[in-house]
Amino acid sequence: MLIVDNIYQFKSISFNENIIFDTDSSFYFVKGVDNPHLSKRKVLEKTNDNFHPFEISTVGSYKVTFSFWYYDKTEGTQPKERHVLYKSDTDELLQDLGKRIDEK
């Protein structure tokens, strides 16, 4: 069971899977009907005061991406875009997908 004081953003990603943001940077993955599951609270780092809802998309069976635009104090084009990947089967959060792809 999940009880939160606030719902910042809610996204149904399938008939029995949901993403529930309780703040502007933390969420829970909730799976219902088949094999109910509640993830640990996950926190997106370095959101830099993102004030728009996250773009949330599924990528395959167990992967969810969060993308958002933000401003920072570094040089270059502003705003910048970040992508975060959540793997629901392992409860793993990859904080900066773009950076990890660029490292390869």
Image (tube, helix red, strand yellow):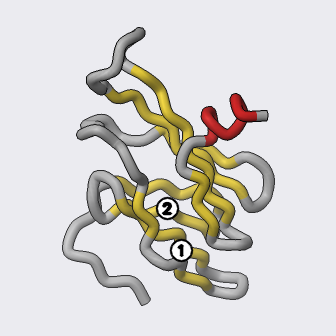
In the rendered view, tell whether residue 8 sits above or below residue 97.
Answer: below
Name the spot of residue 89 as percent of width and height, x first.
73, 71
| Label 2 Cα neighbours within 10 Å, binned few <14 / some 14-19 / many ≥20 | some
Look at 60% across and 46% down and name the residue there. Answer: 65
For disc 2, the marked residue is: 19
Assign the N terminus to one quadrant of the image: bottom left
Q: Quadrant of residue 54?
A: top left
Name the spot of residue 53 as percent of width and height, x first.
35, 40
* Horizontal side of residue 40 vs 14, given as left or right: left
Q: Earlier in the sequence, mark 1 or mark 2?
A: 2
Assign the C terminus to one quadrant of the image: top right
Name the residue type under label 1: Val
Instruction: Check disc 2 and report its element: helix, strand or loop.
Output: strand
In the rendered view, tell whether residue 48 sits above or below residue 1.
Answer: above
For disc 1, the marked residue is: 30
Name the spot of residue 12 as percent of width and height, x first.
53, 57
Q: CA distance from mark 1 to mark 2?
A: 6 Å
Look at 60% across and 79% down and name the residue there. Answer: 32
| Direction top: furthest residue | 77
